[in-house]
Amino acid sequence: MDTLPSVLFPTLLLSISAAFAEQTEPEFGSAGNPVKTEGTGGTRAYIDSLDCENGAIPEYKHVSASEDGPYGNKLDKYIMRCESDSVKIFTIYLDPNHTETDTRPVKGFISWL
């Protein structure tokens, strides 16, 4: 009977740990985790700093975003296009209502910020 708690308790801990591990932060640049920028100037500077992973300069288009971000602000939405052996399309969300601009690149890009 003493072995039952010693087996069940570690199993229960593993189950709880797995449940917490699945709750990861949304991908950087998504509507759930937008790039923070300092105003519209910061948004433009961030977008202009991105290059495709192969070093090519991406084409982009600003699209009206109806989404509110996790901080309660309207988001800017950009459609980015990278061309290499194939064409890749990315959607990037930015929140221009912050005092600093993020410098790390979103997935699929490199940045010179």
Image: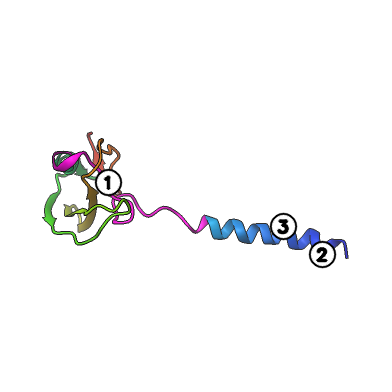
Give left or right: position of 106 versus 78. Answer: right
Give the residue type that dot 2 points to: Leu
In the displayed structure, would residue 108 be above or below residue 99?
Answer: below
Q: How is the image coloured?
A: rainbow
Give the residue type that dot 3 points to: Pro
The quadrant in which the N terminus is found is: bottom right
| Element at label 3 | helix
- Total labels drawn: 3
Q: Which residue is rendered at x = 57% and y = 59% of the image?
A: 18
Dividing the picture into quadrants, the one containing residue 97 is top left
Mark sitting earlier along the chain (1/3): 3
Q: Is residue 41 located in the magenta-colored stretch of the structure?
A: yes
Q: Which residues are magenta?
A: 21-42
The reply to whether dot 3 and dot 2 touch (C-beta < 8 Å) is no
Nearest the viewer among 47 and 108 is 47
Q: Which residue matches tag 3?
A: 10
Give left or right: position of 26 versus 75. Answer: right
* Crowding near the residue tagged with mark 3, few <14, some 14–19, many ≥20 C-alpha atoms within 10 Å: few
* Crowding near the residue tagged with mark 2, few <14, some 14–19, many ≥20 C-alpha atoms within 10 Å: few
Dividing the picture into quadrants, the one containing residue 45 is top left
Determine which of the numbered discs, if any, sits on residue 55 in the image.
none
* Crowding near the residue tagged with mark 1, few <14, some 14–19, many ≥20 C-alpha atoms within 10 Å: many
Q: Which residue matches tag 1?
A: 35
